[in-house]
Amino acid sequence: MDAFAALSLADAPADAVIARLRAALDHPESGAAPATRSDYDLNGAGPGATAKALRPAAVLAPLIARPDGLKLIFTVRAAELTKHAGQISFPGGRVDPGDASLGAAALREAEEEIGMAPGQVELLGAFDAYETVTGFEVTPFVGLVDPAFSPVPDPREVEEVFEAPFAFFMDAANHKRAWREWNGEKRYFYEMPFEDRYVWGATAGMLKALHDRLNQDGAG
């Protein structure tokens, strides 16, 4: 039994968690795979429910080692944005024609949004692509970030950058289900409130997918 499986994620050493991620994630340069998770998962459907063409996008789930454990880096979207203003997300966005790969798109967006240079990130791999109600097929990547990184957010897109414990979001006890009324119907989604931060929707759905990927053999 490896160090990750023998201990809870909160207690496992960072190098054991990183090794587990390397083993569990898809190769960072692998091609796009059809979405297997979506905003529809808790609403009686799944990816492809609307049969519409999806636009490719990629996000980076930046993981950084701190003395008190591994942390995820999140952004708070600028209040002036026309879509998803003020929401907590990972840096990322749509794939541009000049992007060499999905991973390259995620790295480019992270640099544009929070000043995270590609040379400061080691892509550990990708996990389950996610379909959003806004018509994107988002491929999330986990990237190990140089601890010397200091964010420089673009104020046009990002209001704030913050870190939160990776172990918190990988604990199934913190995966909540909530709903809001939309077009006269209840729409269900995941939420993972951390202290005064409200992580929900697609970002929480991706974190749930990452949790499931890490624990697919029952470990953790």
Image (cartoon, rainbow, N blue to C red):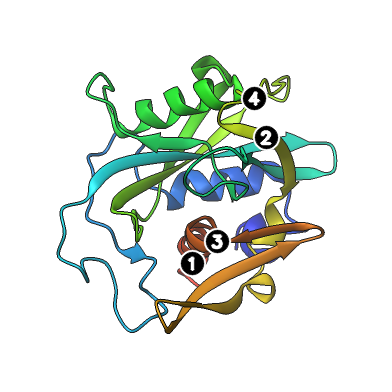
Q: How far apart are marks 1 and 4 (CA)?
A: 31 Å
In percent of width and height, residue 167 lies at: 70, 57
In the picture of the structure, the residue carrying the numbered disc 3 is: 204
Q: What residue type is labelled 4?
A: Pro
Considering only order in the chain, which callout, 4 or 1, is on the residue closer to the N terminus? 4
Q: How crowded is mark 2: few (under 14 residues within 10 Å), some or many (20 or more)?
A: some
In percent of width and height, residue 128 lies at: 36, 56
Considering only order in the chain, which callout, 2 or 3, is on the residue closer to the N terminus? 2
Q: Is residue 219 visible?
A: no
Q: How crowded is mark 4: few (under 14 residues within 10 Å), some or many (20 or more)?
A: many
- 117 on left or right of 4: left
The one nearer the camera, 195 or 68, is 195
Considering only order in the chain, which callout, 4 or 2, is on the residue closer to the N terminus? 4
**Residue furthest to the right:** 68
In the picture of the structure, the residue carrying the numbered disc 4 is: 153
- Tag on residue 159? 2
Q: Which of marks 1 and 4 is in front?
A: 4
In percent of width and height, residue 173 lies at: 68, 76
In the picture of the structure, the residue carrying the numbered disc 1 is: 212
Q: How far apart are marks 3 and 2 (CA)?
A: 19 Å
Q: How crowded is mark 3: few (under 14 residues within 10 Å), some or many (20 or more)?
A: many
Q: In this view, does 125 lie above or below 52?
A: above
Identify the residue shown where x is 85% and y is 43%: 68
Query: For the C terminus, which image quadrant?
Result: bottom right
